């Protein structure tokens, strides 16, 4: 029997989002035993997932608190953690999948050890490396976020297992959970669930806008409004309800924030017609129990990464140059939140409740409808609003490119139509970068040749390495400047440092290989972007026939 | 009383002297009353010492509660005797190896217990301490293991004062034995009288060999004053309050980047309740030395529940008030002096002319001083008045120095040294003598440390700090002129008093003494944390002894000198420093993993 250990430690949403991976692992290895390491606080969520043998919880917050505030000495701390971790090592897992992309989780993955470790892990000297291409992509794409079109759910499944058929997110709810929820929601027929808070205020739409949107819906909606969230969100909910009432909201309101178990919350969401939410853990629970979701994607949230997975959901995203902002951004204005009009949200809600038509104008926001693409991956289709044509073109291109590059299979999703909008500029950039990269490859080969010798010429090697380092900086700067080049440069930047090798010789060969990979990819991309015949525009060998081009609505104004 | 002889004989087996003392005591402190369940219970002055319904069940619950705190390697020290139900429950709930000490402030209570019910073989496992608080403290320090105080409230209430003295004595004894190095973050105020105290505290901790991070908010004084310059009070209050919040957050950021063993705030430190509660949630230990008159400055009411430990300069009502407001631990810790700052000085003739006089007073112009000082002017002696906030004090304008400018510490020391009779009048809001003269101000200690002679208004807490041969005090306004007159003519007497008071400060009242006592008090309450660090348990040698069950740690610990304190971050730093070109062992990966979690700060700031 194959055994897999998944490390997914810290977030409710991430746990629900690994549903497709669990399904895929059971497809890959029927009868596989999958264990999950999770923070104790999230163990109840994990218990709702299907396909796990054991949920192994540790109080990671206690570990942080007790080590940081010096509550326990190093021996006591080590005894606690080693006592918990050593039995896991003894299970000898066939694969460890680390979905928590952090340094400590990488070290934990390294400590656990396995013949196949997916995701970030510790190298032999304690550094961090990623072996799997999808997991590597996951670590790279924050450098070109706007071009990413892979949902985390798919990255987890592709990286942790392999390509496969589409599988919606699912949770295992008991009959008691459903019964409890039905009894809790008596009084009116049909409920709209509202998650107005969020773990980070950056990613929460403004409470008064929630109130206005709900008030407008209540003019046509005969059901009730159900508030969910944590107890710490009480003040936010109170503000929403106050504005809702003041704006004439008449529908009955129930507040379950902080008053349910996770099972009960999932049961409640399963009973609702619709969930209006910020991008939160409960959003994914809503998706996983089959409730339609409207995701308000503000702040540093990018729905393309973490939006509702599968068909039947909608996303509202502000049209703003800085949206979505970086993960570590400290924003002084939160202007993106004001770009989403409560009227637009209300109209979209009415449309989803079958009591109104689909909004035709975004008034500063975009509307996306979720779906499943031809490769069986989650996707979002722009329905209202505009995207930058360049971003839209390259996002579609890179979606196609990486899928084929990392799976080795031909994508059934077509490349974007026509040449890129900035073809002439790209041509110039490519012609500037390519000869330099070819030179860099030669130098890397020379370094590898020197390092291989029995008697190494240290001064010469050092000189070449010094030149290589200086050049590398320059090449990376050039490579990161354009949508046509940035993903390749980011991948190279990671790959060249991604060395889990002992010995100068091996290290030099690894670096030469990274340069050659970059060059090979650049040539492929060049052929796709400015190739003269349509057959030039396929990436996977053996599939160079004319492609049907779809996705024009991505760059429709 | 049918069980008395039997129980005393049992006690005699391992505590013959105590058994004899019990036999000869009068007893009768407790009133024995049958409980509903049938077993004997007891009352004292109408209040129940054990449950009126089921004393055994209640004792069992209490013993169960203590399991959360009491660790097997610690000695449990039980405060509260009663009928010993709780001691029995604790003894029976733990293995025979568990070490339990019962503090017996009054053998008569023990006699009542021994007469009320038969005591089983568990008594043979109990160690008893009795005598004066100081004697009991000495007996307790003889224990080789950390002490964990477990208080059975209803019975401990009878001897709360004895227990407090016991813990104070114990703190002092422990302080002398402490050898480990702590990291203390001292959070100072933005400005004001507690600012120099913060400096003295930092200096004392450094001298004691601890590592100190000083979060000196004095650097923000300019901004604080700028926010206080708005015309409308509401604007001033709002901006200064928000500014204090920012400084609170800045303190949090500092603590996140360099977490200490203890956060020690000095009065007026800008730390709000929300931040304190967050710190507690994140397991940081916090203490406040409230070097203020609690009756005048009442912000402690909002912060009482926020700090883990309060140290105050008043007793009685102050301790009760803080506890009522939610403070968990409150201890008396009087002011002190810093002998490196407050010291005898050799002054030049010019300095004698500038700073010297027969009589002087240094301080701000509080109402009581404005009323009383003019009464002590006389043509019989020269007088100089130093300090600020004397605007409008016309009768004193002739003696006010430097136009009422604020004077620095160095000038202050010169005045003390150059003056024959230093007046030390504690401030208060009324116009006469302080109606509630309890605490002793820093000036008392500073004058003494300078070897300067002083006349200080009498304080209820003064005799415990200085004898009447060390400091001369006065109770009534009218007593002052005759005292000045007398002492001006007795230079030898002044020198004798001054030297005696200086020696007393050096012996008992430096900031070093205070900080030792403060840390020992926290250590006593946290035997497995601050206490263990102070005992040196986190030195390499101690860690290696405890690493028997994890032998893979030994080679990593061996890399440190035996007497060095080693924490997780030190071990990880050593591994990282040696990582280059080397394959790490599994235990090293685990240490690095734990250290990565330790370095997390996002949940703090």
Image: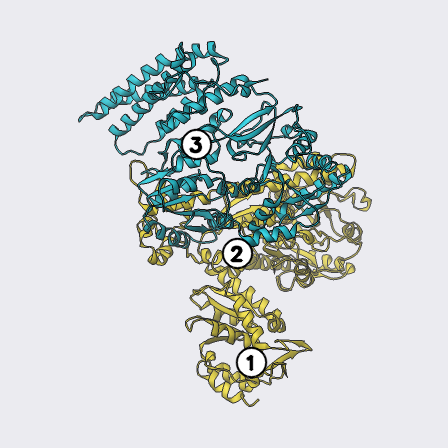
Chain colours: A cyan, B yellow
Rounded to the nearest angstrom, the CA distance separating label 3 from label 2 is: 47 Å
Per the model, the C-alpha gap separating discs 2 and 1 is 33 Å
Report x, y in % for residue A329: 55, 31
User: Which residue does the numbered mark 1 point to in the structure image?
Assistant: B110
**Residue B122 image position (x, y, % from top left):** 46, 78
Q: In whole angstroms, how far apart are the C-alphas of marks 3 and 1?
A: 70 Å
Write down the residue under mark 2: B519
Residue found at the very far bottom of the displayed protein = B2
Which circle, 3 or 1, is nearer the viewer?
Answer: 3
Q: Disc number at residue B289?
A: none
Query: Element under label 3?
Result: helix
Q: Are marks 3 and 2 in contact (CB under 8 Å)?
A: no
Quadrant assignment, res B441: bottom right
Q: Rate crowding at label 2 as few (under 14), some (14 to 19) or many (20 or more) other CA atoms within 10 Å.
A: many
Chain letter for mark 1: B
The mark total stands at 3
Q: Is residue A235 left or right of residue A24?
A: right
Of badges 2 and 1, nearer the viewer stands 1
Which quadrant of the view contains residue B133?
Answer: bottom right
Read off the chain for label 2.
B
Q: Residue at x 17, y 27 (%)?
A: A454
Q: Which residue sits at x=40%, y=45%?
A: B570
Mark 2 touching mark 1, by CB under 8 A? no
Disc 1 residue crowd, few under 14, some 14–19, many 20+, Cα 10 Å: many
Front in this rendered view, residue A4 or B27: A4
Q: Which residue is the site of mark 3? A: A139
**Residue A18 visible in the picture:** no
Question: Residue A407: percent from the left, percent from the top?
Answer: 37, 29
């Amino acid at each position: 029997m194959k055994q897999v250990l998944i490390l997914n430690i810290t977030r409710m949403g991430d746990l629900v989002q690994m549903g497709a991976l669990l399904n895929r692992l059971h497809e890959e290895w029927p009868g596989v035993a999958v264990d999950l390491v999770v923070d104790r606080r999230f163990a109840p969520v994990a218990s709702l997932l299907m396909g796990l043998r054991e949920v192994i919880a540790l109080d990671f917050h206690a570990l942080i608190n007790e080590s940081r505030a010096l509550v326990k000495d190093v021996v006591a701390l080590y005894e606690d953690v080693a006592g918990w971790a050593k039995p896991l090592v003894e299970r000898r897992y066939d694969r460890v999948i680390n979905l928590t992309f952090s340094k400590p989780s990488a070290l934990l993955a390294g400590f656990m050890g396995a013949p196949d470790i997916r995701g970030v892990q510790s190298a032999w000297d304690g550094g961090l490396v990623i072996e799997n291409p999808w997991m590597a992509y996951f670590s790279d794409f924050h450098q070109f976020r706007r071009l990413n079109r892979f949902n985390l759910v798919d990255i987890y499944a592709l990286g942790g297992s392999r390509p496969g058929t589409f599988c919606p997110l699912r949770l295992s709810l008991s009959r008691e959970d459903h019964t409890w929820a039905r009894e809790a929601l008596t009084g009116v027929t049909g409920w709209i669930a509202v998650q107005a808070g969020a773990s980070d205020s950056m990613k929460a739409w403004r409470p008064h806008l929630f109130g206005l949107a709900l008030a407008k819906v209540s003019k046509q909606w005969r059901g009730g409004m159900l508030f969910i969230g944590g107890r710490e969100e009480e003040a936010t909910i109170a503000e929403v309800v106050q504005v809702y009432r003041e704006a004439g909201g008449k529908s009955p309101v129930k507040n379950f924030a902080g008053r349910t178990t996770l099972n009960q919350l999932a049961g409640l969401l399963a009973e609702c017609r619709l969930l209006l939410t910020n991008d939160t853990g409960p959003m994914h629970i809503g998706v996983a129990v089959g409730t339609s979701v409207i995701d308000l994607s503000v702040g540093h949230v990018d729905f393309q990464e973490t939006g509702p997975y599968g068909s039947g959901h909608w996303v509202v995203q502000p049209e703003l140059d800085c949206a979505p902002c970086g993960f570590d951004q400290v924003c002084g204005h939160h202007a993106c939140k004001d770009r989403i009009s409560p009227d637009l949200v209300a109209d979209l809600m009415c449309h989803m409740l079958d009591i109104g038509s689909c909004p035709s104008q975004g008034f500063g926001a975009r509307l996306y409808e979720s779906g499943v693409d031809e490769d069986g991956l989650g996707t979002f289709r722009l329905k209202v609003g505009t995207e930058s044509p360049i971003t839209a073109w390259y996002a579609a291109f890179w979606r196609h490119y990486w899928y084929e590059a990392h799976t080795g299979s031909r994508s059934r999703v077509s490349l974007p139509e026509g040449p890129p909008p900035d073809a002439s500029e790209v041509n110039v950039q490519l012609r500037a970068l390519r000869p330099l990269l070819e030179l860099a490859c030669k130098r890397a080969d020379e370094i590898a040749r020197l390092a291989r010798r029995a008697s190494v010429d240290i001064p010469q090697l050092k000189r070449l390495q010094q030149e290589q380092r200086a050049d590398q900086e320059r090449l990376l700067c050039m490579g990161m400047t354009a949508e046509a080049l940035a993903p390749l440069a980011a991948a190279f930047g990671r790959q060249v440092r991604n060395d889990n090798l002992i010995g100068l010789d091996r290290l030099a060969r690894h670096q030469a290989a990274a340069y050659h990979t970059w060059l090979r990819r650049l040539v492929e991309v060049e052929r796709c972007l400015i190739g003269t015949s349509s057959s030039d525009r396929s990436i996977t060998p053996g599939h160079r026939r004319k492609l049907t081009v779809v996705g024009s609505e991505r760059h429709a104004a | 009383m049918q069980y008395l002889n039997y129980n005393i004989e049992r006690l005699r087996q391992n505590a013959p002297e105590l058994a004899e003392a019990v036999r000869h005591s009068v007893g009768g402190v407790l009133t024995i009353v049958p409980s509903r369940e049938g077993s004997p219970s007891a009352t004292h002055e109408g209040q129940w010492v054990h449950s009126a319904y089921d004393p055994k069940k209640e004792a069992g619950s209490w013993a169960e509660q203590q399991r959360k705190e009491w660790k097997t390697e610690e000695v449990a020290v039980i405060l509260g005797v009663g009928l010993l139900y709780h001691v029995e429950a604790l003894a029976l709930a733990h293995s025979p190896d568990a070490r339990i000490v019962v503090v017996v402030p009054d053998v008569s209570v023990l006699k009542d217990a021994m007469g009320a019910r038969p005591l089983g073989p568990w008594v043979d496992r109990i160690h008893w301490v009795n005598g004066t608080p100081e004697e009991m403290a000495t007996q307790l320090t003889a224990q080789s293991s950390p002490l964990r105080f477990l208080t059975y409230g209803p019975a401990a209430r009878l001897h709360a004062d004895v227990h407090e003295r016991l813990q104070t004595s114990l703190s002092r004894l422990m302080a002398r034995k402490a050898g480990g190095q702590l990291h203390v973050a001292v959070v100072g105020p933005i400005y004001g009288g507690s600012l120099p105290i913060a400096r003295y505290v930092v200096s004392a901790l450094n001298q004691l060999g601890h590592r100190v991070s000083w979060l000196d908010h004095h650097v923000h004084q300019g901004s604080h004053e700028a926010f206080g310059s708005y015309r409308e009070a509401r604007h001033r209050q709002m901006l200064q309050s928000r500014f204090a919040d920012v400084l609170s957050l800045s303190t949090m950021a500092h603590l996140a980047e360099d977490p200490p063993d203890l956060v020690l705030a000095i009065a007026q430190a800008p730390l709000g309740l929300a931040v304190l509660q967050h710190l507690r949630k994140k397991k940081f230990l916090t203490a406040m030395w409230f070097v203020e008159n609690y009756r005048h400055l009442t912000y402690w009411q909002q912060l009482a529940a926020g700090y883990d430990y309060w140290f105050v300069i008043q007793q009685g009502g102050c301790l009760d008030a803080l506890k009522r407001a939610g403070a968990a631990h409150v201890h008396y810790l009087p002011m002190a002096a810093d002998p490196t700052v407050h010291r005898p000085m050799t002054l030049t003739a010019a300095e004698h002319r500038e700073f010297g006089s027969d009589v002087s007073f240094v301080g701000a112009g509080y109402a009581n001083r404005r009323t009383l000082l003019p009464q002590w002017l006389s043509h019989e002696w020269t007088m100089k008045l130093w300090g600020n906030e004397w605007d409008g004090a016309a009768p004193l304008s002739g003696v006010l120095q430097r136009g009422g400018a604020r004077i620095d510490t160095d000038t202050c020391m010169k005045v003390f040294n150059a003056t024959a009779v230093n007046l030390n009048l504690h401030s208060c809001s009324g116009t006469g003598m302080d109606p509630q003269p309890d605490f002793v101000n820093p000036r008392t200690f500073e004058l003494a440390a300078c070897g300067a002679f002083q006349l200080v208004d009498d304080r209820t807490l003064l005799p415990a700090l200085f004898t009447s041969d060390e400091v001369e005090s006065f109770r009534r306004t009218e007593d002052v002129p005759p005292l000045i007159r007398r002492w001006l003519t007795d230079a030898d007497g002044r020198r004798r008093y001054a030297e005696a008071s200086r020696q007393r400060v050096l012996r008992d009242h430096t900031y070093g003494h205070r900080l030792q006592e403060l840390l020992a008090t926290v250590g006593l309450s946290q035997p497995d944390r601050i206490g263990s660090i102070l005992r040196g348990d986190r030195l390499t040698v101690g860690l290696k002894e405890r690493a028997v069950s994890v032998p893979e740690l030994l080679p990593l610990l061996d890399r440190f000198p035996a007497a060095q304190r080693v924490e997780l971050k030190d071990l990880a730093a050593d591994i990282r420093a040696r990582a280059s070109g080397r394959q790490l062992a599994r235990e090293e990966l685990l240490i690095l993993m734990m250290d990565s979690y330790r370095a997390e700060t996002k949940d703090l700031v």
